[in-house]
Image: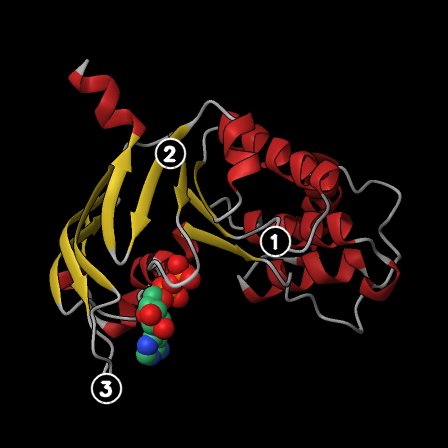
Amino acid sequence: MIFLDRVSKKYPRTARPALEKFSLQVAPGEFVIIMGRSGAGKSTILKLLTREEKPTNGKIVVGGIDYDDLHDRDVPLLRRRIGVVFQDYKLLPHRTVYENVAFAMEISGMTNREIELNVPKILELVGLKGKEDKFPRHLSGGESQRVAIARAMVRQPKILIADEPTANLDDETSIEIVKLLIKINRYGTTVLMITHDTNIVKKLRHRVVQIAGGRLVGDTALKKAVK
Ligand code: ADP
């Protein structure tokens, strides 16, 4: 469960809060789209969930972990539960597809045997079989994002947050990437997809949480509950 209760965030030396009394509950296994224009506060939600930033006010609880009780030493454990992908992929340029994924596994403490066993499985899951030896500069945007998603999934996180994962992709490739996120969600991972792309959102039937000026301005799940 992801639980944010009246969370506010004001960055130092800014006039207005980036988030204001923002509340959201996401059940395990949900697929939620967080939508809003640039500057609405979407990435701030991501940074608060990964503990890159701390809220000015309000409560955050993720998977039973109350962030008020979180020590700095617990942050790596928290981050293991939350996979993150970004619009610019952040791949290691001098490593192949295989090595990008294997390196993430190495960092998370897996043995060579585990790595040899799991890299092919995860590359198959994201649809990159046959691309193992390619370097990032030889990949399309969609393939690069698949590598980034594979890397985010190596620790089998409970939650995957995708921050504008389709921002640099054409419409057709964007849909393919969203389908991959939906597939990952069906295997049991909670997915939060941050986007400003209304075209993509219109094509999906998933829950949409809308944010503007740091405030929650719409949640299709709440509308359903009222009807
Ligand atoms: P979005 O992801 O929806 O584009 P952000 O969460 O990145 O929005 O930003 C929300 C607001 O907070 C914006 O006005 C932005 O300029 C401001 N902001 C974000 N990060 C910082 C920061 N580190 N310092 C100061 N202001 C910030």
- What kind of element bears circle 1? loop
Residue at which label 1 appears: 167
Percent coordinates x, y for residue 102 in the rendering: 69, 58
- Residue 221, x across and y down, in percent: 28, 26
Dot 3 falls on a residue whose secondary structure is: loop
Mark 1–mark 3 CB contact (< 8 Å): no
Q: Of 226 and 113, which appears nearest the observer? A: 226
Is 162 placed left or right of 74 in the picture? right
**Image quadrant occupied by the N terminus:** top left
Disc number placed over residue 13 in the picture, else none: 3
Task: Give the image quarter of residue 137.
Answer: bottom right
The residue under the point 41% across, 45% down is 35
Q: Amino acid at mark 1?
A: Ala
Residue at the location (31% across, 27% down)? 220
Quadrant of the rendered structure where residue 56 is?
bottom left
In the foreground, 142 or 105 = 142
- CB at mark 3 closer than 8 A to ligand 1? yes
Q: CA distance from mark 1 to mark 2?
A: 18 Å
Q: Is any atom of residue 202 visible in this view?
A: yes
Judge the density around disc 1: few (<14), some (14-19), many (≥20) Cα neighbours within 10 Å: some
Q: Find the distance from the CA under tag 1 to the CA under tag 3.
A: 29 Å
143 w.r.t. 55: above or below: above
Q: Is residue 86 left or right of residue 33?
A: right
Sequence order check, earlier mark of 1 and 2: 1
User: Eyeballing the image, is 10 above or below 176?
Assistant: below
Q: Residue at x 35, y 61 (%)?
A: 50
Circle nearer the N terminus (1, 3): 3
Which residue is drawn at the image coordinates 53% and 61% (left, top)? 108
